[in-house]
Amino acid sequence: MADSHKRQGDMPEDTEGKLGLSAADLEEEEYIDEIYEIIDAVVPRTDDPTLPASTARVWFLGLVFGSMICAANTIFTYRTNSFTISAFVTVLLAYPCGLLMAKVLPHGLLNPGPFNYKEHALIYVMTSCMAATPYALYNIVGQKYQLYQTDLSLIAAFGFAIVTQCFGYGFAGLTRRYLVRPAAMLWPSNLATIAMLNSLHGRDDGAGSRYPMSRFKFFWLTASAMFFYQLLPSYVMPMIGALSVICWFTNNKSDNKLAMTGPSANCTTPSLPPLWAMLNQFIGTWVFLWIVVPICFYTNAFGNDQDIAKTSVRGFALNTPSTYNKNGVRIANTNFVIRNPDDTNSLILNQTFYDESKPILITSYFAMEYTNSFVVFVAALVHVGIWYGKDIWHRFRATLKDLDKDDIHATLMDAYPEVPDWWFILVLVATTVIGISVCQWGGFDLPWWGTILAMLLALISIIPIGTIQAISGQQIGLNVMSEFLIGLLLPGRISAVMAFKTFSYMAMYQGLSLVADMKLGHYLKVPPRAMFMAQLVSTVLSAIISTGTAAAIYESFGKRTVPVSPQYPAGFVWLMQEQDDASGWSSNNYNTFLSAGAIWGAIGPARFFGPDSPYFKTLLGFAVGLILPIIPWYLHKLQPNSFWHLVNIPLIFIFPAFSGARRSDLITPLIIAIGVNYFIKKYRHTWWKKYAYVMSAAFDSGTGVMLIILFFMVNFNAQYQMPFPSWFMNSGDAERCLPDITLTCMEHETMGNAYGNKFEAEQDPSCQ
């Protein structure tokens, strides 16, 4: 490591030069030295400015892979259980493609030389921007299709998606001197990607080592195995993906409410998060799903929990995002809203229907999900404050002092032209103007001051929350607080509340995602202007592809004419809405978002969580979040060598899925996590270091490809669906919690409606 590349703080320690420093300054120096130890483990202190970055093959591979992952992840938003393909997959897929293009293409514009790590990093950044589906999809699908706002044009939808994706871009650029350039802003999430890029472009991936198989070969073998395996739980024998042991012994009993879900074999990437994080999350999930939620249900903690859905097939409801009236009868969210007679772009609360149905009820699970979201918001602030507060303060002070005293990586980056601030200001002004126009006149009902307020909320929060994320790796979301704020300011206006939530949440979330990618480019010395164009183009393109794909998939299922009613105000029903949980494509995330819109927007937080509401007690979550994180912190102070520093209250209280998702995934992922991140990491560390992340990406890829094939082969044509024939491990209910006679009827109905046929329930004795 050349001495010329060392910053002054990394020269041999000059004790005489430090004699004049205060204790606080010395501590800050130690923090910076600690940061450099972490960075130096994976980031070289050298750079070759002659290496090309923004090349033709970068744009080709980045946009092709990004478009494929973007479209696939958009389709996956309709799944009952959430699933996404990580952008990390492209780190592996782009490598052989880049090498091949460097070998076969003629030298020149299309082939500037050997495929290098800067090109590889830029491809990853582009696909990373495109892999995350726009949050705006939930607004667009919710309003245009689920609430039948048929006059919401796709042009306005495209504009809304682009604006909300790019809204935070201006903030990201304007805060880069605070969140990117200083060495104290670590952004630890980038280090694994850098390590993988280093290994692929180094010399430690071939034969001669203890594990001679290349990462690329291992990736394809593992992805292929997962591809073929996924056919079993997703099509042939779904029961192995939802093993509910208790249901096997209680399904024919008159009261099987204790048949809670058990272990699953349908998992993808449990090896990616650290083991301690997985343990916190799974312990929290077990406690809440197997203890807290059943207790709330049996004690009627929220008023009439046991009366909800008494007339349904199961006779009760625990895990669903639906809303119910005072008698426990399910309500379609379309019933809550009507067109504003004074403004046809506005959807407002149907006050007459609300007065007839109140109090509006939700299941015990859904209520606890809200309680936990309140806990997590406050607990994350408290947890970060008490565990990282001193660290953050010293590093922030060091950052302020170091703004004009660049470290080696910032010095090396000075060799490249910086992106002028006015580029980011132009993006911010343009997205603000277009956002106001789209919301005001495009059908999203958010007044101009609402867009400005969302911008100010993001502007105030991005630096402090970004500082916390850059140092601790933990992000604190604004979605709950933004819903609370706008729900109080604009009660009864569901579209406005959902639009404000998307604007404020995405301005910060997308802004910090872009900042993290900028830091990756900073570490790997990717020219800032090449990074700017790659991020901006891929972000805009992803919004267009996602919106178009989501609309095309929804409309491709077709619609069925029905009488005009409050539930179906347009006189038809989209067949996508009739996909049930058993199909695996019930649009659960969209249903949850719309129910949240009805609760926070149409009904409003003052009504739904007010003193007269059965859900007023959920607000105790704020107090719990304030107090609970202090307990493990204090116990750690008393017992420094104990496990208390691994207890993370925000992770324990985070539900790993939306209401309505199948909850039979509580055992097998943990077994894999312990096996990979404890036993293999401890006893076969070289194998773990080389293959663990590759295995995770391979699981994602193999699973994703099979799910896409099955979606188009089995579910895509609503008039001609092709389910696997019913048998014991492919019944109407994968968990087999329902009585056998009910399962038989459901199996007959599924197969009776398959392959273009029509099932007549009245002609089947088992359905009488």
Image: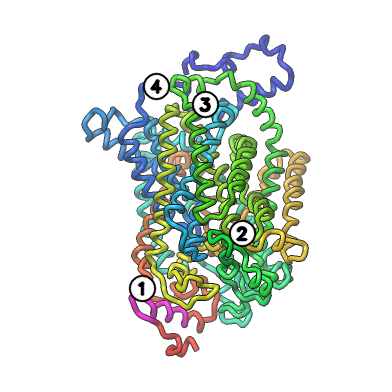
Residue at the image point whose x is 46% and y is 90% from the top:
765
> Could you tell which of marks 4 and 1 lies nearer the N-terminus?
4
> Could you tell which of marks 3 and 4 lies nearer the N-terminus?
3
Asked whether the viewer can see residue 320, the reply is no
Residue annotated with mark 2: 493
| Circle 2 Cα neighbour tier, 10 Å, few/some/many (<14 / 14–19 / ≥20) | many
Q: For the residues labelled 3 and 2, say whether their Cβ atoms are less than 8 Å apart.
A: no
Nearer the observer: mark 1 or 3; the answer is: 1
Q: CA distance from mark 3 to mark 4?
A: 17 Å
Q: CA distance from mark 4 to mark 1?
A: 58 Å
Q: CA distance from mark 1 to mark 2?
A: 36 Å
Q: CA distance from mark 1 to mark 3?
A: 58 Å
| Residue 493, placed above or below residue 23 | below
Asked if the magenta segment contains residue 175, the reply would be: no
Asked whether the viewer can see residue 9, the reply is yes
| Circle 3 Cα neighbour tier, 10 Å, few/some/many (<14 / 14–19 / ≥20) | few
| Picture disc at residue 719 | 1
Residue at the image point whose x is 69% and y is 55% from the top:
488
Q: For the residues labelled 4 and 2, say whether their Cβ atoms are less than 8 Å apart.
A: no
